Amino acid sequence: MTELVETELNKLEKQEKVILELGKKMLNGEQFPLDLLASAVLDRSLSLIFGFTSLVRDKNFLAAVHLVRCHLDNLLRFSAAWIVENPHDFANEVISGTRIEKLKDKDGKYLKDWYLRNKLSEEYTWVKNIYTETSGFIHLSNKHIFSSSRLKKGSKNLLEISISKTDNNVSDNSRLEAILGMDEITKTICRYVEGWIWTKNNPGKVP
């Protein structure tokens, strides 16, 4: 891996400080159901970020990229709290074990992943691309074939096939795209938490 990849991994890991500070601000004062949901999202975010960076450094891209999709799931489902009738009722339903896709938004639409993806994409256009690209790694697809095989240099029809625990056929560009995706997802989750903190501190006001 290049020095640039390591630099971007370090930048991503520095988000830990931002996440912990947000958690402290959020939990300072009266607690609401949405605080529990947000705390779970922040906690899961840290686990996913550091699991991801460890796997990238271990040259295990196929496992690492799965975590990008999990992190996007974090964002998609947390963002649902902003489109339901009552965010605290929504949080209580999730806490009690109700599947999010069984719940509805304020327009009566079920909160399925594809619906949340489309709603979030209205503001963050990159969401659809990350959703599509990472979903291709969750289920066995041509992405896995291209990761394990490539044309032999100087040949037009001879394949080199690799069966290995390391990502021998993954480019640093692919690693960087995944890292930047994790970083953007993290920043967006933090924006939502910041918005919730503002709302808690300014009851009755519209941001």
Image (tube, helix red, strand yellow):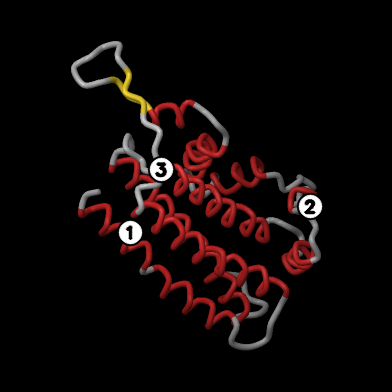
Image spot of residue 99 (x, y percent): 77, 53
Image spot of residue 18 (x, y percent): 43, 73
Q: Residue 103's mark?
A: 2
128 or 99: nearer the eye?
Answer: 99
Horizontally, residue 5 falls left or right of residue 207, namely left
Image spot of residue 203 (x, y percent): 66, 80
* Quarter of the figure with residue 165: top left
The residue located at (45%, 49%) in the rendering is: 64
Above or below residue 25? Residue 164 is above
User: Alpha-carbon neighbours of circle 1 within 10 Å: few (<14), some, or many (≥20)?
Assistant: many
User: Alpha-carbon neighbours of circle 2 within 10 Å: few (<14), some, or many (≥20)?
Assistant: some
65 or 112: nearer the eye?
Answer: 65
Q: Which of label 2 and label 3 is nearer to you?
A: 3
The residue located at (79%, 52%) in the rendering is: 103
> Could you tell me which secondary element the residue under label 2 belongs to?
loop
Q: Residue 165's mark?
A: 3
User: Alpha-carbon neighbours of circle 3 within 10 Å: few (<14), some, or many (≥20)?
Assistant: few
